Image: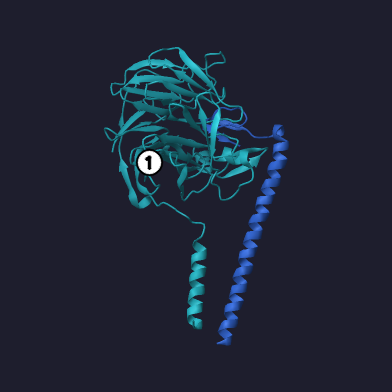
Amino acid sequence: MKKILYSLAVLVLIVITFNFSIVTKRVNNVSSIALQNIEALSYAESTNQSCLGVGSIDCPVSKNKVKFVY
Amino acid sequence: MNCRKLFQAFVLMLALQSCVGNKQIPDFDAISKKISGKVLSSGTVYMRYPFRVKQIDSTLVIMDLHGTDYYYHEFSYPGLKLKRSFAKPGIGPNEFLDAENIRIDKQGRFYLLDANKSSITVFDKNKQDIQSRIKLSDKLIRTLDFDIVNDLTFVVPDYTGKHRFNLINKKGQITKSCFTIPSKRNKLSNVLLAQAWRSFINYNPSNGILAMVTQLGQVLELYNLKTNTIINIVYGKDGEPEFINKGGYASPCGIMGYSDVYVGTNKIYAIYWGKSFKDIENDPNSKDGGNMLQVFDLTGKPLCQYILDKYITGFTIDEKHNKIIALDINRNNPLVEYQL
């Protein structure tokens, strides 16, 4: 009986730790993207983005409709 | 409660937890059917990239996204005789910098969205001249689609990304801002997210449903504008738009998703490409357009998927005759008709 309860408690601890690591990872990812955005918006003019072809995607640089945005 | 029951409850909890996040994935494979279309002749009108087609009563209008002489061509329907071409590309005051979409109101007036001029131009039914031009609010950034809600209001998405869409009056001023982009991944960078979530829209005033489909992902959003509620957000198996932040702009790196949507009386139709940019790059003969016409009920439940024999960009539904009128840019005669 005690053994089962102990193993259950250990399992719960493992799950909590696992979930915590996922949440932490997500938060870290979002933060880095946010930082990138702030940096990128500051240097919007120095973008090295280019657009190619004839298509329906809105090119943020030329404002034309293109096939690829790189 | 004995230990075994406790353990079973725990396992059940774990199983349920693993399901969180996969809210709704429509599986169209089991409900697909192939259909063949009939190519229609639109005469000698040359169109470079026909992208939108609208049909109301005896009028059919095709929008050429890369028009050289004119952006729009009006035909009689079903006769398909050219009545007039209008909206000249150019930098003059009565010319157009680009063409995004056209809407037709109950009185037969044409409304043309020019994102580069940030304006909606109104054409009278039978006149060649512009009737009026509505300058869009400075608070909107790059409005790439719109629809008529009623005699006083338009619905527009835009690149500010603060809200999912705005209602604007006939003076172009925002009267109401609604909801937020339903991204599960990133809620922080509004402008970037709005670029990546660029969507095509359609509103049906009879049932009050606004549908939005993502160009760079597989997401269908349904809103009820009469009750101001979210009906459903349907994430397909290809999921949210994927993008890389390049110099403050969203650079798409996932797939080409939807390119047009139509809200009918009882059903919603959306044309889906489902091609990755890698595949398009690797296959120079890859056709522009999608051949999967997905059909949903008004709550977003998948009903069926038509596998078309041609690749189409835009379409409309003639509900009276149960037909799809579609545009295939890969052929000289782009108009194609499918009987449902």
Instruction: Identify the secondary structure beneath mark 1.
Output: strand
Between A58 and A49, which is closer to the camera in this rendering? A58
**Would residue A9 be found to the left or right of residue B7 on screen?**
right
Chain A color in figure: blue
* Vertical placement of residue B89 versus B281, above or below: above
Q: Report the residue that reaches farthest toward the left.
A: B321
**Horizontal and vertical percent position of residue B289:** 43, 35
* Mark 1: amino acid: Ile
- Residue B31 visible in the snapshot: yes
Residue B11 drawn at (x, y percent): 50, 73
B78 sits left or right of B103 in the view: left
Relative side of B217 to B203, left or right: right
In front of the other: B159 or B179? B179
The colouring scheme, among rainbow, by chain, secondary structure or one colour, is by chain
Judging by the rendered image, the residue that carries numbered circle 1 is B268
Residue B227's place in the image compared with B153, above or below, is below
Q: Residue at x 48, y 30 (%)?
A: B154
Query: Which residue shows up at 65% across the image and 63% down it?
Result: A21
| Mark 1 surroundings: few (<14), some (14-19) or many (≥20) residues within 10 A | many
Report the front residue among A17 and B222.
B222
Residue B265, quarter of picture = top left
Chain letter, colour cyan: B
Q: Does residue B46 appear anywhere in the picture?
A: no
Across and down, in percent, residue A4 comes to 56, 83
Residue B104 at what x, y percent from top left? 40, 25
Is B77 rendered above or below residue B38? above
B13 lies above or below B171: below
Mark 1, chain letter?
B
Q: Quadrant of the N terminus of chain A?
A: bottom right
